[in-house]
Image: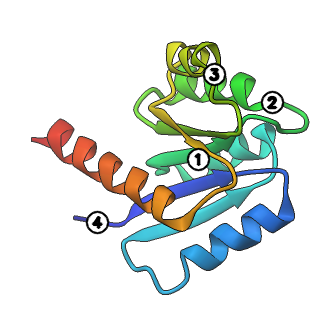
């Protein structure tokens, strides 16, 4: 299987630096980083081949929910995982009803990110077959 192109969107430089470290020496994925919903949409447009977006809920310019809606409208095949500390049933229902594939709780743990990516690889394989 070819590399999965992964975009991580978070306003925190520390979070982006940590995620960048997580992907060091990992060959199965190509990582892209953005710091706002607007930057995320620009990256998706420029790269044309993003498979999965890890999208923070709290973002400047365009918040995560607004970005989710726009990404799913323009690029319905992209898998979007919301990154958030919000884990109430209504918050999760809101994310899923707007097209999120799932969510991951912050603070981010490396193994949780890669578990989600393995789930997405399996879903992509099913879609292709």
Calculate the distance from the C-alpha at mark 2 to the C-alpha at mark 3: 18 Å
**Front position among marks 2 and 4:** 2
Q: Quadrant of residue 33?
A: bottom right
Residue underneath mark 3: 88
Is residue 50 left or right of 106 when viewed as pictured? left
Q: Quadrant of residue 108?
A: bottom right
Q: CA distance from mark 1 to mark 4?
A: 19 Å
Residue at the limit of the structure toward the right, as seen here: 61
Dot 2 alpha-carbon crowd within 10 angstroms: few under 14, some 14 to 19, many 20 or more? some
Kindly check if marks 3 and 1 are in contact, taking CB atoms under 8 A apart as contact: no
Q: Residues within 10 Å of mark 3 (few under 14, many from 20)?
A: few
Whole-angstrom CA distance, mark 2 to mark 4, is 31 Å
Q: Nearer the viewer, mark 2 or mark 3?
A: 3
Tag nearer the camera, 3 or 4:
3
- Residue 112 pos. (x, y %): 48, 56
Reading the image, the residue beneath label 4 is: 2
Q: Position of residue 129 (x, y in %)?
A: 9, 41
| Sooner in the amino-acid sequence: mark 3 or mark 1 | 1
SS state under label 4:
loop
Find the distance from the CA under tag 2 to the CA under tag 1: 13 Å
Q: Residue at x 28, y 65 (%)?
A: 2
């Amino acid at each position: 299987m070819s590399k999965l192109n992964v975009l991580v969107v978070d306003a925190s430089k520390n979070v982006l630096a940590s995620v960048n470290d997580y992907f060091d020496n990992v060959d199965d994925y190509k990582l892209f980083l953005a710091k706002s919903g607007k930057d995320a949409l620009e990256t998706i447009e420029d790269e044309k081949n993003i498979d999965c977006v890890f999208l923070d809920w709290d973002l400047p310019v365009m918040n995560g929910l607004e970005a989710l809606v726009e990404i799913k409208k323009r690029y319905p095949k992209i898998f979007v995982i919301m990154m958030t500390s919000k884990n109430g049933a209504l918050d999760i229902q809101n994310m899923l009803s707007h097209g999120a594939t799932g969510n991951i709780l912050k603070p981010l743990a490396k193994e949780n990110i890669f578990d989600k990516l393995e789930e997405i690889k399996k879903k992509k394989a099913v879609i292709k077959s």
